[in-house]
Structures are given as structure tokens and as C-alpha cells.
Amino acid sequence: METYALELIRNGKRIDGRELTQFRDIEIKEGIIENAEGSAYVRMGNTQVIAGIKMGVGTPFPDTPNEGILSVNAEFTPLASPDFESGPPGENAIELARVVDRGIRESKSIEMEKLVIAPGEKVLSVFIDIYIIDNQGNLLDAAALAALSALLNTRIPKLDAEGKIIRGEHEGKLPVVHKPITVSVCKVGDKLFLDPAKEEETILDAKLSIAVMEDEKICAMQKQGSEGIEFDVLEKMVDLAMKKSMELRKLVK
């Protein structure tokens, strides 16, 4: 199957008949977890991801005393793939969480200063938990899209007189002001393509995941694969990511 997929890509074709820059069908469902402050389900082809958001009260970091806290975690559930095992997050889960975190954080997607309860003492924390339900390729793009969709429907919980969260009661929405979209551009030989299926991920020379903001500014990048990327090819990869990010952003409300 890998040899077949490689031969197809070299000839400008895909194993599932798509164009090189064509994504699989995408489905997004918001607010799917009743007890979460925000949540979303994303299906990209047969890849399925859920993002859930809980909010808590914590102490701000010393270097950002006037900002809330953001934390992203990812869990590769064993039911998603025979390659995933139960236990602490593995290397791939940690990397995925960090890249999703970087896109949200560096784009300043959330107005973190509005999450301050008492400057330097008490702030709201945003915990994003990403669960991989079915791995059929391109987990990063699906996870980033699920995290953003969940943030956009997140409600801020009410606090009591002592500054503790009243579960089940909310006041207003999380101040999300930017929508970073992550697009992974894959390279095999001289061919570039998007949204790799699981079989295609095993034959990549290189992959560049690019988080793009509404104004086409890049807020995060992550390179994978053993092969280097020449500068003129890098420019083409960035252009592809920017064009596709505009299409994907229309899917998020």
C-alpha cells in the first residue's frame, strides 16, 4: 500500500482520488459535551477528534501576572489506532498538544488579560483536552480545528463571592478574538499536497505545519520529516497553507 501511495503521489494522484491540494470532507459539531465549558467534534475524512474545554481558578505565572492561564493536553486513545497504547502521553501526543498550544498562544487568540480576577493573585485557567478518536491521518490539522471550534463556543463560568467557580452557571463567552488555522503541507519528491491520509503519512519526505491568522500572518510553524526544504519550496508551502486556511476558516463559526 505504501509503494502504491508513493507511486500515485509522484504522478500527481492520491490514493483516494483527491486532488493534491484537496482536503477530505470536514464535519464540525459544537457543544457536544454538556458538562464542559466548551467542546467540539471534528471529522476530517475518517479521522475523528474531540476537544473539550474546562475552566478553573489558579495563580498566574510570575512573568505574566496580568494574564489568564492556557494549557493544552492531547490523549491518543488506544481505540483510535493499533499504534496507540494506554498510559501517560507519548512523544507524538506531547508534540501535537504543543503545536496546537503554540498556534493559539502566539496568535493571541484569547484575550488572556480579560481572565484576570485579582492581578498577580488569581486568574481563570483555560484547559483544552484533545482526544483522538480515530486516526486516519492528519491529526494535527483536525486537532487544531477542534480546539479552535471548542474555544469559540466556550462560556465563562460564574464565580461566587469567594472567587470559586459555580459549576453549571455561566456569564458571557470566552473572549476569542482571532481564529488561527493550522494547515500541514506535505512534500514527496517535487510534489506538495495537503491533508495526508494515514497511508500517505508513511511516505513523506517532509511536512510543514503552518498556523495562519486572518490577516495571513504566520503565528506558528512545525517541521517534521528527515528531508530538508529548499527556500523556493518553502515559499510554495506557505502560499498553499495561506490559501487553504482561508477556506477552512469559513467552516468555524
Image: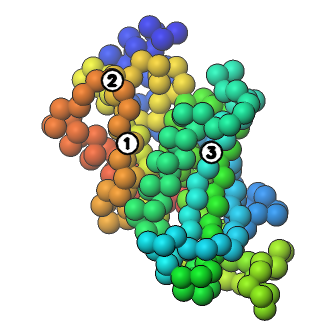
Callout count:
3
- For the point 62% across and 80% down, which residue is it? 122
What is the x, y in percent for residue 115? 58, 79
Residue 132 in sight in this render: no
What is the x, y in percent for residue 155? 69, 74
Residue 200, placed above or below residue 111 = above
Query: Would you identify the image quadrant in which residue 6 lies?
Result: top left
Q: Earlier in the sequence, mark 2 or mark 3?
A: 3
The amino acid beneath tag 3 is: Ala
Q: Residues within 10 Å of mark 3 (few under 14, many from 20)?
A: many
Residue 74 is marked as 3
- For the point 74% across and 85% down, which residue is it? 163
Tag 1 residue: 222
Q: 75 and 193: which one is in front? A: 75
- For the point 58% across and 54% down, which residue is it? 72
- For the point 77% across and 78% down, which residue is it? 165
Tag 2 residue: 226
Image check: 91 left or right of 56? left
The amino acid beneath tag 2 is: Ser
**Colour scheme employed for the rendering of this structure:** rainbow
Q: Residue furthest bottom?
A: 161
Q: 5 and 73: which one is in front? A: 73
Would you say the residues marked 2 and 3 are in contact, meaning their CB atoms lie under 8 Å apart?
no
Q: CA distance from mark 2 to mark 3?
A: 24 Å
Residue 225 in sight in this render: yes
What is the x, y in percent for residue 66? 49, 81
